[in-house]
């Protein structure tokens, strides 16, 4: 069978780093003998100019039909109002495809300078569809509003069902890792009802996995402990906003957001997406670091392989990760944001060379 992927380049540096991720994905799949068809569709400003919306309905249909998606960053803060076609493709895809789990690994890499001396390898499992995120936490309409001038209200939505399934995803991930421990991060001392619902479900899942270590930590303490001793964490499970903040912190400590891979996953769909934004100031300069989206594509391939029982896809994902490690280990083969001199295309060529067994 032929694997079908959909590439959505997005805005800013999106087209450049998406092209890099697609090229590396093709090379990795060819190496492991997997036939692939990668289609491309416009979203963001390119789609708005052509179709009057940043996420045309045919693109959404193509996303539903694809085995997986490689999503470039988008400049959604610069879009017009939703009524004028300015839909955030990232949030809309998460809702439409029920991508309830945002998996964000952060690990130190050999040779890559970091902000801390401790080596660590952790994963933050972030609930992706609820919490305070107003563009996706309600069935209809935004989750924040202004009833009278000068008064803004935001709704935090936390449900038992969503908390249970993100906890199950976190414990399943921990069971496959050497650390075999889960930390639930919360703020139940203040958000007693909503985080109380979250913790009740996580504790119930933890009780069904007695072989997995389980602890709980307040989010402010977790932010401090990440700096003090990041190696104490293995898998962190938390709600939407806390996970978003902590994962950026962890990724910056591990070398920077340019390396920060991410996978949005549900039960039936997976989307590779870099943690960082669209960096419009770098667009068209050829200087963007594509590592984050390349690493995200590796995560997507591994997820597809594990879900479908295809070891070739898992091997392709692992090969991309190993190639990134090889290239990033040497200052001379890094991009400028990491102290190197390579641009987007030259760095991508080095990764592909490492994939094929050549010298980085």
Image: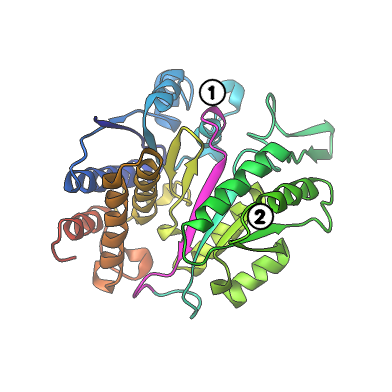
- Left or right of 127? Residue 194 is right
Q: Name the quarter where the N terminus is drawn.
A: top left
Sooner in the amino-acid sequence: mark 1 or mark 2: 1
- Left or right of 165? Residue 113 is left
Of 102 and 171, nearer the camera is 171
Which region is colored magenta? 95-112
What residue is shown at x 77% (from left), y 38% (from top)? 155
* Distance from the alpha carbon under mark 1 to that under mark 2: 43 Å
Task: Where is residue 208? Give x, y as percent.
Answer: 64, 52
The image quarter in which residue 73 lies: top left
* SS of the residue under disc 2: helix
What residue is shown at x 56% (from left), y 58% (from top)? 247
Q: Is residue 323 above or below residue 37?
A: below
* SS of the residue under disc 1: loop
Q: Residues within 10 Å of mark 1 (few under 14, many from 20)?
A: some
Q: Which residue is mark 2?
A: 206
Q: Check residue 108 for magenta coloring.
A: yes
Q: Residues within 10 Å of mark 2 (few under 14, many from 20)?
A: many
Q: Is residue 311 above or below residue 41?
A: below
Task: Where is residue 168? Give x, y as percent.
Answer: 59, 47
In the rendering, which numbered label is found on residue 85?
1
Of 45 and 122, nearer the camera is 122
- Left or right of 161? Residue 277 is left
Task: Where is residue 68? Give x, y as percent.
Answer: 38, 35
- Left or right of 303? Residue 20 is left
Badge nearest the viewer, 1 or 2 = 2
Q: Is residue 138 above or below residue 27?
A: above
Q: Which residue appears farthest toward the bottom when viewing the image? A: 117
């Amino acid at each position: 069978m032929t694997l079908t992927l959909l590439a959505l380049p997005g805005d800013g540096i999106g087209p450049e780093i998406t092209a890099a991720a697609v090229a590396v994905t093709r090379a990795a799949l060819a190496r492991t003998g997997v036939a692939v068809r990668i289609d491309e569709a416009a979203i963001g400003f390119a789609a708005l100019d052509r179709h009057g919306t940043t996420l045309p309905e045919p693109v959404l249909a193509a996303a539903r039909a694809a085995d997986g998606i490689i999503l470039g960053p988008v400049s959604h803060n610069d879009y017009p109002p939703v009524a004028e076609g300015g839909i955030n493709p990232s949030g809309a895809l998460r809702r439409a495809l029920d991508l309830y789990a945002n998996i964000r690994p952060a690990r130190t890499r050999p040779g890559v300078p970091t902000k801390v001396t401790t080596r660590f390898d952790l994963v933050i499992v972030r609930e992706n569809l609820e919490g305070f995120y107003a563009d996706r936490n309600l069935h209809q309409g935004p989750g924040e509003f202004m009833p009278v001038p000068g008064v803004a209200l935001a709704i935090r939505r936390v449900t038992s069902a969503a908390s249970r399934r993100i906890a199950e995803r976190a414990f399943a991930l921990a069971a496959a890792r050497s650390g075999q421990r889960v930390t639930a991060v919360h703020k139940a001392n203040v958000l007693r009802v909503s985080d109380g619902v979250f913790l009740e479900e996580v504790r119930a899942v933890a009780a069904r996995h007695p072989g997995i270590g389980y602890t709980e930590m307040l989010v402010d303490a977790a932010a401090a402990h990440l700096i003090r001793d990041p190696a104490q964490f293995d898998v962190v499970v938390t709600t939407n906003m806390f996970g978003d903040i902590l994962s950026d912190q962890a990724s910056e400590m591990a070398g920077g957001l340019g390396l920060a891979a991410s996978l949005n996953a549900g039960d039936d769909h997976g989307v590779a997406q870099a943690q960082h934004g669209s960096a419009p100031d770098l667009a068209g300069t050829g200087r963007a670091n594509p590592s984050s989206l390349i690493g995200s594509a590796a995560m997507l391939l591994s997820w597809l392989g594990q879900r479908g029982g295809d070891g070739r896809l898992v091997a392709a994902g692992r090969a991309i990760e190993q190639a990134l490690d090889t290239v990033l280990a040497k200052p001379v083969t890094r991009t400028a944001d990491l102290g190197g001199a390579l641009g987007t295309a030259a760095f991508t060529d080095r990764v592909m060379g490492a994939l094929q067994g050549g010298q980085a």
